[in-house]
Image: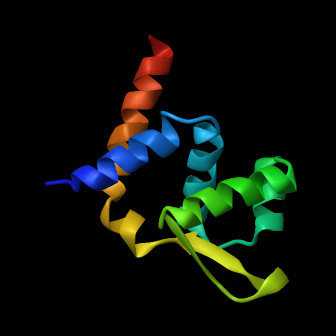
Amino acid sequence: MSDPTARRLLWYLFAGSKGGENRVKIINLLQDTPLNINRMAETLNLDYKAVQHHVNVLEKNNLISHIGEKYGIMYFVSNYLESNMDTFREILTKINKSKTN
């Protein structure tokens, strides 16, 4: 059984608000390896400030965490998101289906 609070949060952050697509890209990237904001921006070909904004939103909502300080900060998927990863994938599937219709 999925957490209804997590479900609502994930729907809002990835489907119900502007920038959800970029936040999905960041989460997908961080599932593979922890990265700093600069590396995320380079890999995703996005503006540094845009990535910084989305990272702040994701961290504020406990979906990613960080270790380190200043330029050495590395971000990774949080335990909270990992425990709700099935819900995250389900929402992505529904988002992608709605785009093709």
User: What quarter of the picture does the N terminus occupy?
Assistant: bottom left
**Residue drawn at the location 39% of the way across and 49% of the way down:** 9
x and y percentages locating residue 5 in the rendered image: 28, 53
Seen as rendered, the residue at the extreme top is 101
* Up/down of 22 relative to 1, above or below: above
* Up/down of 55 relative to 72, above or below: above
The colour style of the image is rainbow
Left or right? Give the position of 72 relative to 22. Answer: right
* Up/down of 83 relative to 13, above or below: below
- Write down the quadrant of residue 37 in the picture: bottom right
- 20 or 86: nearer the viewer: 20
Left or right? Give the position of 101 relative to 87. Answer: right
**How many labels sit on residues?**
0
x and y percentages locating residue 97 in the rendered image: 41, 22
**Residue drawn at the location 41% of the way across and 47% of the way down:** 10
**Residue drawn at the location 49% of the way across and 61% of the way down:** 61
x and y percentages locating residue 91 in the rendered image: 37, 39
x and y percentages locating residue 86 in the rendered image: 30, 53
Left or right? Give the position of 57 relative to 87. Answer: right
**Residue drawn at the location 84% of the way across and 55% of the way down:** 49
Seen as rendered, the residue at the extreme left is 1
- Write down the quadrant of residue 53 in the picture: bottom right
User: What quarter of the picture does the C terminus occupy?
Assistant: top left
- Write down the quadrant of residue 79 in the picture: bottom left
